Image (cartoon, grey):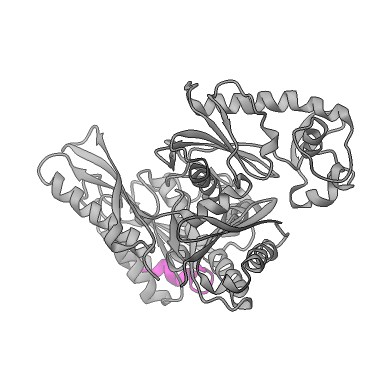
C-alpha cells in the first residue's frame, strides 16, 4: 500500500512537513528552521517525518510542496532567467513598451529584448492585423543565444489565442525546442499589460522551477523514495511537477493559500477568517465554502503588477521573530529562521515578539525569562491585528477567527469583531496540511458572445477547464466544475460576456 502522502511548506522562518494517511489523519509532523538556501530546511523537514514513520516510509506515494522559491526569486532578483518579450498588437499598443512599469533593476535583470509587432485581436476575436511572422523571425535572430525564454502576449488573446500559438511555433522553429515559450492566454486574464507581466514573470521563473524540482528530487533520492510529486499553486490546489515546470508563476501565493485550506480542514469550518502567524509575517485571509476568497484586484509581486487570480490576503509585518526596537516599538524586520539563536528566550540578544509573548504569559518556550516590560508591546500589536481582522471581515462580526502557524500565540484569545478565536490541533503546521489535502484544479478566462452561440462557447470553455485540471493531475472521472462567473462587457458592437470557469477534483490514482 502506498496510501501515505507528505505535505511540505517552505516559509521564511520555518519549513513544515506532515504525513497524512488515506483518511487524512496526521501520522507525523515536524517544524524545522528554514535554511539560507531553503533546500537544506526542506531536506531536514522531510527527513524528520520519515524518521517518525520508520519502516512505514515505504507507504509514501505522494509528496506535495508549497514553496516561496518563486516569490523570493522575484523579490531578491536571483536565479531569474533572461526573457525576450514579444507583444502582438502594433501599431495600437506601441505607446507603452513591454515591462515599462517594472522596477528598473528587475527589468534590467530579466529583459533580453522586446518587440512590439503587428497582430492582435479585437474583444470579439476578430483580427486587428495579421501576425507579422517575418518581423518576429527577424527579432528572434537578434536575441538568439541571449534569451533563456520567450514570452508572447497578444492583444485580447483570451478571446482568440491563435496568434500566440502560431508565434510559439515560430519561436520553436527559430530558436529550438530547448527555449521555452510562455504564452499569456494560459496564465493571465483580461488586461494587456498585467497579462503580459504575468507571462514574462512566468518565463523568467523557468530556471527557478527546475532548481526546486531538482532539489526536491535529490532529497527524495537520498531516502530512496519513488513518489509522485506535486506543487501547490496560488488558489489552494495542486499541480503536477510537469505542469509546475510550465507555469511556475502559479506557485506564487501558495503559502497563504495552503494555510487557509489547512485551517479549514483542521478546524472543520468552511466560512471563517484565518490568521496564519509565522516568524516573519501574519497573513490574514477569508474562507468561503472551504476555499480562499479570491482577490478582485490585481496582485503586485516585487513591484510588478499582474492579473492572475490570487487569494485575498492581507499581510502584516508581524511575526514571532519581529524585532522590538530600543524604543519598545516592534518594527518591520524579523530575525526569521535565526530566531532559535537570536531571541532573548533562546539566549540571544535581540528582543522579539516571541519574547514579548513569553513575558506576558501567552507562550511558554525557551530557557531564558525575558524582561517583564516587553509584555506592554502586545497592546499595540493586538490593536494592529484587530484592525486587520476588521478590514478582512468587511463588517461581518459573526465570523470565527481561526489562528494557525508557529506564532499563533501572538493573537489573543479575545478579539473584537469575531465570534470566537479557534486554535485547532496541529495548527502550527496548517500550511503543510493544506498542501497535503489539496485538490487539483484547472481554470480559464475567456470572452464569449452573449447571444447565439453563448451556450456552445461556455461548454467549450468548461471542457478546457476540465482538461487543464486533468493535465495538472486530477482524476478525470472525478473532476467537477466548481465556479462559473459571467460578467457582461459594455461598449461593444455585439453583446459579449467575460467568463471565468474553474474545475477541480481529487488526485488521480497512482
Marks counted in the figure total 0
**Residue 460 higher or lower than 371, as above or below:** below
Which residue occupies 70% across, 63% down? 37
- Residue nearest the viewer, comparing 197 with 128: 197
Give whichever of 285, 370 is nearer the camera: 370
Can residue 244 be seen by looking at this rendering? yes
Q: Which x, y percent locates residue 340? A: 80, 51
Residue 335: image location, x then y, percent: 78, 46
Give how far across and how far down residue 23 sits, in percent: 45, 57
Q: Is residue 116 magenta?
A: no
Q: Which residue occupies the foreground of this view, 57 or 467?
A: 57
Residue 349 located left or right of residue 222? right
Q: Residue at x 42, y 66 (%)?
A: 181
Identify the magenta region. Answer: 137-148
Judged from this view, the residue extending furthest toward the left is 452
Q: Quadrant of the C terminus?
A: bottom left
Measured from the top left, where is residue 28 in percent x and y? 61, 59
Quarter-of-image position of residue 432: bottom right
Q: Residue at x 73, y 41 (%)?
A: 320
The residue under the point 50% across, 61% down is: 21
328 lies above or below 121: above
Amino acid at each position: 500500500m502506498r496510501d501515505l502522502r507528505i505535505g511540505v511548506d517552505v516559509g521564511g522562518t520555518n519549513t513544515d512537513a506532515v504525513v497524512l494517511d488515506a483518511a487524512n489523519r496526521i501520522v507525523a509532523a515536524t517544524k524545522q528552521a528554514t535554511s539560507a538556501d531553503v533546500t537544506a530546511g526542506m531536506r531536514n523537514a522531510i527527513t524528520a517525518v520519515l524518521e517518525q514513520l520508520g519502516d512505514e516510509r515505504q507507504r509514501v506515494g505522494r509528496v506535495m510542496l508549497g514553496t516561496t522559491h518563486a516569490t523570493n526569486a522575484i523579490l531578491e532578483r536571483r536565479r531569474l532567467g533572461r526573457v525576450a518579450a514579444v507583444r502582438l498588437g502594433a501599431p495600437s499598443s506601441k505607446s507603452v513598451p513591454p515591462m515599462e512599469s517594472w522596477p528598473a533593476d528587475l527589468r534590467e535583470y530579466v529583459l533580453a529584448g522586446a518587440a512590439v509587432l503587428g497582430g492582435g485581436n479585437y474583444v470579439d476575436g476578430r483580427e486587428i492585423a495579421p501576425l507579422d511572422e517575418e518581423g518576429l523571425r527577424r527579432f528572434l535572430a537578434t536575441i538568439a543565444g541571449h534569451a533563456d525564454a520567450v514570452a508572447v502576449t497578444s492583444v485580447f488573446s483570451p478571446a482568440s489565442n491563435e496568434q500566440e500559438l502560431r508565434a510559439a511555433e515560430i519561436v520553436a522553429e527559430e530558436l529550438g525546442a530547448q527555449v521555452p515559450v510562455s504564452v499569456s492566454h494560459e496564465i493571465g486574464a483580461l488586461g494587456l499589460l498585467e497579462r503580459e507581466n504575468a507571462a514574462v514573470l512566468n518565463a523568467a521563473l523557468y530556471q527557478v522551477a527546475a532548481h526546486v524540482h531538482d532539489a526536491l528530487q535529490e532529497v527524495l533520492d537520498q531516502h530512496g523514495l519513488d513518489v509522485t510529486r506535486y506543487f501547490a499553486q496560488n488558489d489552494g490546489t495542486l499541480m503536477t511537477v510537469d505542469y509546475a515546470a510550465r507555469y511556475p508563476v502559479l506557485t506564487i501565493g501558495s503559502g497563504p493559500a495552503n494555510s487557509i485550506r489547512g485551517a479549514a480542514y483542521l478546524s472543520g469550518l468552511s466560512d471563517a477568517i484565518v490568521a496564519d502567524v509565522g516568524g516573519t509575517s501574519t497573513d490574514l485571509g477569508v474562507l468561503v465554502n472551504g476555499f480562499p476568497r479570491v482577490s478582485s484586484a490585481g496582485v503586485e509581486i516585487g513591484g510588478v503588477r499582474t492579473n492572475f487570480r490570487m487569494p485575498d490576503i492581507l499581510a502584516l509585518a508581524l511575526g514571532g521573530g519581529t524585532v522590538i526596537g530600543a524604543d519598545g516599538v516592534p518594527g518591520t524586520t524579523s530575525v526569521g529562521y535565526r530566531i532559535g539563536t537570536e531571541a532573548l528566550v533562546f539566549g540571544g540578544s535581540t528582543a522579539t515578539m516571541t519574547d514579548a509573548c513569553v513575558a506576558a504569559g501567552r507562550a511558554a518556550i525557551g530557557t531564558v525569562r525575558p524582561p517583564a516590560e516587553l509584555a506592554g508591546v502586545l497592546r499595540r500589536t493586538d490593536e494592529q491585528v484587530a484592525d486587520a481582522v476588521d478590514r478582512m471581515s468587511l463588517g461581518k462580526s459573526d465570523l470565527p477567527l481561526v489562528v494557525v502557524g508557529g506564532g499563533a500565540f501572538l493573537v489573543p484569545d479575545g478579539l473584537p469583531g469575531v465570534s470566537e478565536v479557534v486554535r485547532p490541533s496541529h495548527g502550527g503546521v496548517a500550511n503543510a496540511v493544506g498542501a497535503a489535502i489539496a485538490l487539483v484544479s484547472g481554470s480559464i478566462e475567456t470572452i464569449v458572445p452573449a447571444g447565439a452561440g453563448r451556450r456552445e462557447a461556455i461548454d467549450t470553455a468548461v471542457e478546457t477547464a476540465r482538461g487543464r485540471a486533468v493535465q495538472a493531475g486530477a482524476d478525470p472521472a472525478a473532476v467537477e466544475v466548481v465556479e462559473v462567473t459571467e460578467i457582461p462587457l459594455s461598449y461593444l458592437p455585439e453583446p459579449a460576456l467575460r467568463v471565468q470557469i474553474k474545475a477541480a477534483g481529487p488526485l488521480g490514482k497512482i
